[in-house]
Structure formats: C-alpha cells, structure tokens
Image: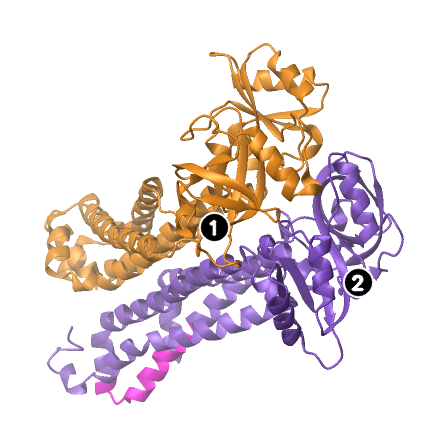
Amino acid sequence: MFLALKEMRRALVRFGLLMASIGLLVFLILFQQTLQTGLITSFVGAIRNQSAPVLVYSVDGRRNLQGSIITPDLQNKIVAVPGVGSAGEIGQGTFSVTAGGKLTTAAIIGYQTEGLGSPTTLVSGRLAHADGEVVALASSAGDGFGLGETVVVQPGGLKFRVVGQATEIGYQASPTLFSTYPTFEQAVLAANPDARATLPAVIAVAPAPGITDAELVTRINDAVPGADAVTRTDAVASTPGVAQVQQSFQVIFVLFGLVVPLVTGLFFLIVTLQKASSLTLLRALGAPSSALVRSLLFQVSLVLVIGIGIGIALYTPLSSQTLGSIPLSFQTGAVVLWSVVLFVLGLLSALVAVRRVLRIDPIEATTGAGLGR
Amino acid sequence: MRIAWLELRRRPSRFVTATAILALLATLLMLLGGLLDGLLGGSTSAVAAQRGDLLVFSSTAEKSFVRSRIPPAQQATVAQVPGVAEVGGIGVAQLAARVPGKGPRDLADVALFGYELAPRGVPAPPGPGEAYADSSLERKGVRTGVTIEVGPARTPIRIVGTVNGLSYSDHGTLWSSADTWRTTINANLPEAGVGPGVFQALVVRVDPGADATAVAGRIDRATGGATESLTVSDAVDAIPGVSQQRSTFNQIIGVTVVIAVVVVALFFALLTVERTVLYGVLKALGATSGTLFGGVVLQGVVVTAIATAVGAGIALLLAAVIPPGTIPYTLLASRVLSSALFLLFAAIFGCVFSLRRVLRIDPASAIGGGQ
C-alpha cells in the first residue's frame, strides 16, 4: 500500500487526470438523472400528486389534460358504470397571468370534489374552498405565487389569492395552481370571451368499496367506448412525452456509464504494462502476487472513490438549483446507486490489469522479459 | 512525424482502447446533439418554416398561439403599418384524429393549422374541409385521399396532399384554410373557440430592405401595445421549453467535450511517459521537441478521426433503427460535422498536456546523462 500511494503521489498529473475524468462523468450522470426526474415531475407532478385514484380521459384526449374534453353525454355514461363510487370533474387550462408584477404563464387545474383531484402534497396554508382561492406550486413562490399573494388572469383581470402551497404539483413545466372547479371556469371565460363552453378535461373517479382501481379502469373502458380510464400511476407514465424522455435518458446513461470502466481499465492496464519490469523485480525479491494485486486494487479503489467524490461534490451545489422553470433536487437514491454501479464496474475493468500482474514470472527478472506484450 | 505514423500503422492495438473510448464519446456527442435536434425539430419546425419575417401575437399571450387572439381590425391595422409588405393570419389546434381502418382507440395526434400565407414547403390553402398532411402522419395511415375525423366532434377533413418535416409540439401537422381551422376548433375545443375572422397570430413579410425589428416596433405601437411582434427565430425560441432544452443539452455536450479532452490528455500522457527513453534517443539524434510533439498530435488526430468515423457510423445506425415516434432523434449532417470539430479540438488540446513532458526530455538521458 505504501508503494501504491507513493506511486500515485509521484504521478499526480496522470492519476489526477483519471480522477478528473471519472469525476466529470459521475457529475454528468448524476446531473442528468436529476434533470430527468425534475423534468418529469415538472411536467406531470400535478397528476402524480392529486388525490383521484382513477382518471378518465376522452379517447380523443390521448392522455393529455390539454387535449381531453368530456362531453356531458360521455360524463353521464362514465358515472353510470357499476363500480364507480364517487366522481368529480377536473378541468385544466394554461393562462397568461400577472404574478409578482410580471406577466407569466400558469397552468390552472380546477377540481369539483375535494379528494378527487385536489393536491396531496400541501406544505403550507390550506386547500382552496371559495371562489378565487388557489393552491400554488411551492417552488414558484419566488415568482409571485407565494402564500397570500394575488395572481391576476390576463386578459380578463380575474384575481386569485394563494391560500396554500404544495410541492411537486407542476404541470407542463409551468407554475401550477389548483382551484375549485367554478374558479377554473371563471378563468377560462375571463381569458377567452369567445369560449363556447367550459367542459371538464377528465372525470376523476374512485371505486366503490370492494372494487380495485384496476377493476374500475377495465369496467369503464369496456362499458364506454369513448372513455379512456387509467389509474393515477398509469396516467403519469403514459402522459405524452414522459416515456420518450425516459427512453432518451436511459440511452445516455448507459453510454456514459460505459465510459467510466473503459477509461479506468485502460489506464491501469497501461500503467501495469509500463511498470512491468519493476513488478517482476518485486516478485523476484519475494513479493507475493496477492500483494501486488492488492496494491493495484487499492489504487483502483482510491481513484474511483476520489473520482466519484469529485463528481458528487460538483453535483451537490447544482442539485439545489432551478433550471429554467424546472426545480432540481438532490437524488440520494441516484447518488448511492450510481456510486455503487460505477465503483463495481471500475473494479471489474481493472481485472485485465490484475490478470497481467498474476502472469508475472519472477524468473524473468533474470532475463528481462517482464510481462511481455 | 514519420515514426508516429509508422507506430500507428504497425502497432494499432496500442491505440484500440483509446479509440474505443473516444468512439463512445463521439457517439454520445452525436446522440446528445441528435436528441436536441429531434426535440427542437418536433416542437418548432412548423413555426420555423413560416415564410415571413415577423410573427405577431396578442401582448398578453406570452407568445403562445393557444392564448393569442388577433381580431380582424387588428390585422387591418398591422397591414397599414409602413414597412409591412404582406400579412396573413395563422392559427393552430392540437387534436386527435380517427383514421379509416384503424381501431377506435388508435388515434393520430395532429396539429391543425389554418393559414393565409403558405409556409415553406406548403402549397396555397386548400379548399373547405381539406388539408395537406405532414409525411410523419403516414405511419398512422394519414395519406392523400383519406378522409379523417378530427376531434371529439369528428369533424371530417380530407387529405389532399403531403408536406415534409413540419411538426408542432411533437404532433404531425395538417395545413388547412382559415375557415376549416376555425370550424374545427370551434366544434372540438369550445374553451379555445375563436370568433369570425379571428386568428391566433399574424405572419408578416416586411418590404425588401426594411429592418424587421424596426417594423416590429412600429406594429406594436400602431396597435397601442395590444400586440407583441417578434422575429420568426425569436418566436421559435419562445416556444415553451425550446431555449431551456437548447441550453441544457449544450451544457451537457460541453462537459462531454471536456471529458474527451481529459481522456485524450490522459491517454497521450501515458504514452509519452512510456516513450521517454525513445524520445531521448530521438532528441540525441537531432529530432526537435516540435517534431516529437507533432508526432503526438498526429497520433491524437488520427485516433480521434477514426473514433469520430466509428461514432458517426453508430449514430447513423441508431437513426436508422430507432422506431419513429419513440425517441425524438434526428441526426443532421451539421451535427456530425460540429461533433467532429469538437473532438478534433479535444484531441489537439488534450495532446498539449504531453507537451511539457516532451520539452523536459534531456537528450543526454539517451547516453545515461540523466542517471
């Protein structure tokens, strides 16, 4: 171990470059993992963190709140399906609003029945009960959506007061407000006087006692051809764009994840070949192969630990920032998972160098053949 | 240089792993760029294709088509502004379409545009109830001659031709007359309804030689601040998520280039250490540090060029095998070229790390002077 450390101190630039490259790769992987989570949460957090266990879109809605419209006829058919315990309307629209003195965009989600579409991650204040009251996305508090602040719909001038804040209720990466259904209807008509009607985007339903969410979904879809019922979890996963974002990032993760062991393995293989004669001499002087392998693995482990540490150190301050309108957060699970995966892959990649060390024949110290290449 | 070249030819195995790592990084660069271009193209190509200099939205719309309304009187005002050559209204509605022969739940996502000035690649507006369809919709069965039913009201629209590469918000586009668009949006999206003659935005062509930015200012003053006029490229950037996607991906691409620099530096630093004795001999025989460093750079550039070619091959293969509608991936020639240039820079810059060691080599070491 002493020799291993001494070698690293003497070749600081080489080992430093390796640690830097591993650190940058780890940083990029963690940052992208956080970005992926932040993106998905800011796009569909409002669906994930609302209280309805089953959402029923129109088939034409393509699982998109903005595209789905439930006509009165369709709504009547949905609520008449045996197994529906309770049902309520949910409407959604994206509006221009003035908040904190600035014109900005906000998504408004109106729900008819508390417990069927209301936010579940309230962290301060209370839910909206009266006209003009809203619960706002907590991370947008600094943009004029703080508790007690007033938000004005433009055009129309309809005023909302923020009475509560909830985390991770973003929709379409916009500041998001949850209101009662009548407040949502007022917003639609204020912003667009040409609007013909205000129809719900989805019907939130809860199963009757003894019926599971999945059974209710099947019953509704079988009974009502124009309805597209999904559980809350499936609604999140099947929102347009979510699967594409996840697939894109998976490909990137795999490729970045491959670079770390390749760089580590190549580095230690070359270093092992370069010091072949010294290693042969050590073996001839009585050093066992296991000691040389331990020394190599010690160096690999140290480089990986420091490299991963650099990556986490670069990632930590960035993980608490907001990227555009996407709030990021430190992903402990991702940090642990990637640290373990990259450490194990890095160690495995050093096996080629270990094999070379084990092949050293001490007799070659007298012939100068070393490892051979 | 000659020795460096000979080493590359006679000992290629020495460079294989570094080439593999750089090829992986080249693939990553092109993949990241392809994802960015795919995402941006899917969101913006229909807006970018507008054959105009300016897009005019209502000032409270935050540059959003959905929230913008331009009444006929405002359009007339804009047309009178000095410097404006031509004005045409435009609007869009995102809906689902039922296609003959497809199942009742197998719908196609479409963005129906109503327009007056034809964008690049789109003919003049078709007749009532007709539309041109983007070729990306063909895989959903939307082809010339087919009549599809759009939206929950099942408004019939007959496809009379095909256009290429025009998407909006990841939806294939349909291009119809203004009246067809208005009828369809009012029947299917009552909350987003539009009155007679109303558009969501205006496409403005300015007089030849006129300053588009100055004309934009005049338009907004003429409408009393009721409009917000911006260039087409600014309108593209204003589409939600576009600028954020671009800056985020560019940052990731930048860090990947830095990683490539570090990998090249690491690899050639190791090779230089290995060749210290050889370089001492060559220096003793009269080779200059510049010649030796030139050899290192040559090897770095050749390794990177091969890695880039391999990376481009993999990136092209990915473009061929990724099914349409899954990962938004578009590989452009400009992206391959820019990635190659980034990697070339990484190769040369990475080799500079070895320069110090090459300069420090004492020719006397070749005859034991260093011992």
Residue A366, position as x, y percentages in the image: 12, 83
Magenta span contains residue A287? yes
Chain under disc 2: A
Residue A34, position as x, y percentages in the image: 56, 60
Q: Which residues are magenta?
A: A283-302
Which amino acid lies under the numbered mark 2 shown in the image of this protein?
A: Val
CA gap between label 2 and label 1 equals 46 Å
Q: Residue at x 71, y 73 (%)?
A: A82
Q: Nearer the viewer, residue A215 or B171?
A: A215
Tag shown at residue A29? none
Q: Which chain is orange?
A: B
Q: Main secondary structure of the magenta part?
A: helix
Q: Which residue is mark 1?
A: B99
Q: Is residue B345 left or right of residue B132?
A: left
Mark 1: few/some/many CA within 10 Å (<14, 14-19, 20+): many
Q: Which residue is mark 2?
A: A123
Residue A335 in view here: yes
